[in-house]
Image (cartoon, rainbow, N blue to C red):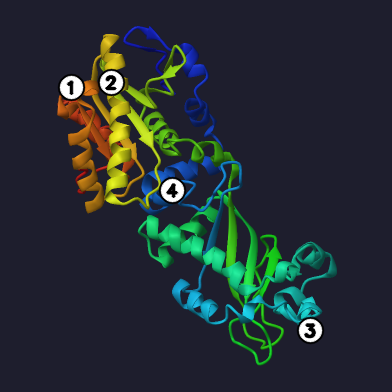
């Protein structure tokens, strides 16, 4: 790693030693984590999901596990069915269903197992929810509502979202914690119900003990705890991802720069004596245009304060930008334009408009190289540079 220990002659060794971002990037040596971060650079859908705010993911408290739901059922169809049966679903599940033989729930996969194989598969696996009178409506609807909110904020269809969750599992950055299974075929005299299955070994088809048809399934996926410190930070996973890219492309950089206990930059890159200041921000994406404009303006004002700090220290900052998790659409473009006009003039202090900017979430590698090129006209493309026809606004 080519980490800066000074900026314009100012020693930042202590800041480097204590930097959470630098220490995390140094720790990306396990093959699975390396592969995951490389995929984030290449897969825009995965990046979009992993840069969602905790609120957009439905995580109300910062100390709670980060859980994602995934279902192959069409959300609107299932929610419509649940609404139709909402009153019926408030009743406790009949005893006849609670006392079923677990072996009737599984296909030949389970029956063909030896007893020794069945024990870990079945143990703590089967429980029908009768507490609080809960049934399908309350359990399934919560998960489907979460999915619907997420795919709305990341502008992704259900199929792409489920594929992205499967990719997270393949990359070993998430584990299936449990399943919720339900029957919607409406057997006569039976209240709709949901079955909660713990564990991640659900490989066999599960059938309803009443009608014999396959149950619908929804996964509860818990994200790798190693990602929690990043995702719970204001910059989310973005600073570590940019740091990983800069390390792979052998750039000189540093992160979490603190002077006298005050932070003055998430990422700073140095090339031939010029410095590039980057701030990273994760916001709730479900904001209206006015709300988006306000948080962008706040981000730009902070960027300008940091720019002025380094300018007063005699450091040549040739470009200062904010990376956000907002998606590139007309709402972002209008909010950005208004925010740039409304930044605090007392903070801006004559800083040229061309020196500051704010970027949506789009192709990290291309964006970083674009920023560098803007201040280094003779820059030759690096080996790591990714060519893209898409223009970043």
Please report contact status of discs 3 and 1: CB closer than 8 Å, yes or no.
no
| Residue drawn at 50 percent across, 41 percent down | 231
Q: Earlier in the sequence, mark 4 or mark 2?
A: 4
| Residue drawn at 48 percent across, 44 percent down | 35
Q: Label for residue 351?
A: 1
Q: Earlier in the sequence, mark 2 or mark 1?
A: 2
Q: Earlier in the sequence, mark 4 or mark 1?
A: 4
Please report contact status of discs 2 and 1: CB closer than 8 Å, yes or no.
yes
Kindly state the secondary structure of the residue where label 2 is placed: helix
- How far is the residue under mark 4 from the one under mark 3? 43 Å
Q: Earlier in the sequence, mark 3 or mark 1?
A: 3
- The residue wearing badge 2 is 307
| Residue drawn at 48 percent across, 62 percent down | 147
Kindly state the secondary structure of the residue where label 3 is placed: helix
Kindly state the secondary structure of the residue where label 4 is placed: loop
Q: Is residue 168 above or below residue 77?
A: above
- The residue wearing badge 4 is 52
Q: In this rendering, which labeled residue sits more in front, label 4 or label 1?
A: 1
Q: Position of residue 360 (x, y in %)?
A: 29, 43
| Residue drawn at 78 percent across, 76 percent down | 102
Of the pair 359 and 332, the residue shown nearer to us: 332
- The residue wearing badge 3 is 96
Quadrant position of residue 103: bottom right
Kindly state the secondary structure of the residue where label 1 is placed: loop
């Amino acid at each position: 790693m080519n980490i800066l220990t000074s900026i314009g002659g100012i020693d930042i060794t202590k800041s480097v030693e204590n930097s959470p971002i630098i220490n995390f990037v140094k720790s990306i040596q396990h093959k699975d984590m390396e592969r995951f971060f490389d995929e984030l650079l290449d897969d825009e859908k995965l990046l979009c999901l992993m840069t969602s705010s905790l609120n957009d993911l439905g995580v109300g408290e910062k100390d709670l596990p980060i859980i994602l739901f995934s279902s192959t059922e069409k959300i609107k169809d299932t929610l419509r069915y649940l609404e139709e049966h909402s009153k019926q679903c408030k009743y406790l599940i009949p005893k006849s269903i609670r006392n079923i033989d677990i072996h009737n729930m599984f296909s030949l996969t389970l029956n063909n197992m030896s007893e020794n194989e069945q024990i870990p598969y079945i143990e703590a696996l089967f429980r029908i929810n009768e507490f609080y009178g809960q049934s399908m409506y309350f359990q399934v609807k919560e998960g489907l509502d979460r999915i619907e909110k997420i795919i709305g904020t990341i502008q992704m269809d259900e199929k792409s979202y489920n594929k992205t969750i499967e990719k997270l599992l393949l990359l070993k950055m998430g584990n299936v914690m449990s399943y919720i299974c339900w029957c919607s075929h409406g057997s006569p005299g039976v209240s709709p119900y949901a079955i909660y299955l713990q564990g991640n070994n659900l490989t066999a088809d599960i059938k309803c003990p009443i009608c014999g048809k396959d149950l619908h399934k929804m996964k509860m996926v818990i994200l790798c705890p190693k990602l929690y410190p990043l995702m719970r930070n204001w910059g989310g996973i973005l600073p570590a991802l940019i740091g990983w890219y800069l390390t792979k492309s052998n750039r000189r950089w540093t992160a979490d720069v603190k002077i006298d206990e005050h932070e003055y930059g998430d990422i700073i890159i140095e090339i031939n004596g010029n410095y590039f200041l980057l701030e990273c921000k994760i916001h709730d994406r479900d904001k209206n245009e006015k709300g988006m404009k306000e948080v962008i303006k706040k981000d730009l004002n902070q960027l300008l304060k940091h720019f002025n700090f380094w300018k007063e220290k005699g450091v040549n900052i040739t470009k200062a930008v904010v990376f956000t998790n907002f998606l590139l659409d007309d709402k972002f473009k209008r909010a950005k334009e208004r925010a740039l006009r409304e930044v605090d003039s007392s903070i801006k202090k004559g800083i040229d408009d061309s020196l500051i900017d704010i970027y949506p979430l789009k192709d990290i590698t291309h964006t970083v190289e674009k920023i560098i090129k803007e201040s280094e006209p003779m820059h030759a493309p690096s080996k790591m540079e990714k060519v893209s026809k898409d223009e970043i606004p």
